[in-house]
Image (cartoon, rainbow, N blue to C red):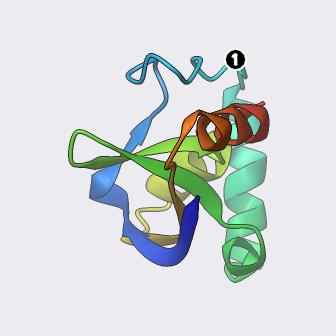
Amino acid sequence: MRKERIKAKMTDLIMNEGQLGWLPTNPRQWTQKDIDLTKASLQNDPDFTEERPVLVVECDGKLLVFAGNLRTTAARALKWEYISAVLYTPENDEDKDTIKRRSI
């Protein structure tokens, strides 16, 4: 599997709603309080996403977030233009299984 650290444009990111048949929908739910706490955390430590980037995979010309959906939502609320990400490019079924495990 190929992985590449990137600065992802927020407008290129989409949330995981089951667009890829091999990747289950994001099961996590969060409240506005969770979003507000994450926003505060990102405001206090904007470099945090450098250490813990969101994980994405290409999907129809966009970047589907499979790990880091709450951070992405908070960054959008803060009107960030970019967020640190790791772009995964699966090359076989084993790679897809790894992405599935990391999405949970």
Quarter of the image for the N terminus: give it. Answer: bottom right
Of residues 29 and 32, the one nearer the viewer is 29
Quarter of the image for the C terminus: give it. Answer: top right
Q: Position of residue 69 (x, y in %)?
A: 60, 41
Of residues 74 and 27, the one nearer the viewer is 27
Q: Position of residue 103 (x, y in %)?
A: 70, 36
Secondary element at tag 1: loop
Which class describes the residues within 10 Å of circle 1: few (<14), some (14-19), or many (20+)?
few
Height in image: 74 above or below 7?
above
Instruction: Residue at 70%, 17% (x, y): give it.
Output: 27
Callout 1 amino acid: Pro
- Residue wearing tag 1: 27
Q: Quadrant of residue 51?
A: bottom right
Q: In screen coordinates, is 11 left or right of 42?
A: left
Height in image: 75 above or below 6?
above
Height in image: 54 above or below 101?
below
Instruction: Residue at 28%, 55% (x, y): give it.
Output: 11
Q: Quadrant of residue 44?
A: bottom right
Q: In screen coordinates, is 29 left or right of 64?
A: right
Instruction: Residue at 69%, 32% (x, y): give it.
Output: 97
Q: Position of residue 14 (x, y in %)?
A: 38, 40
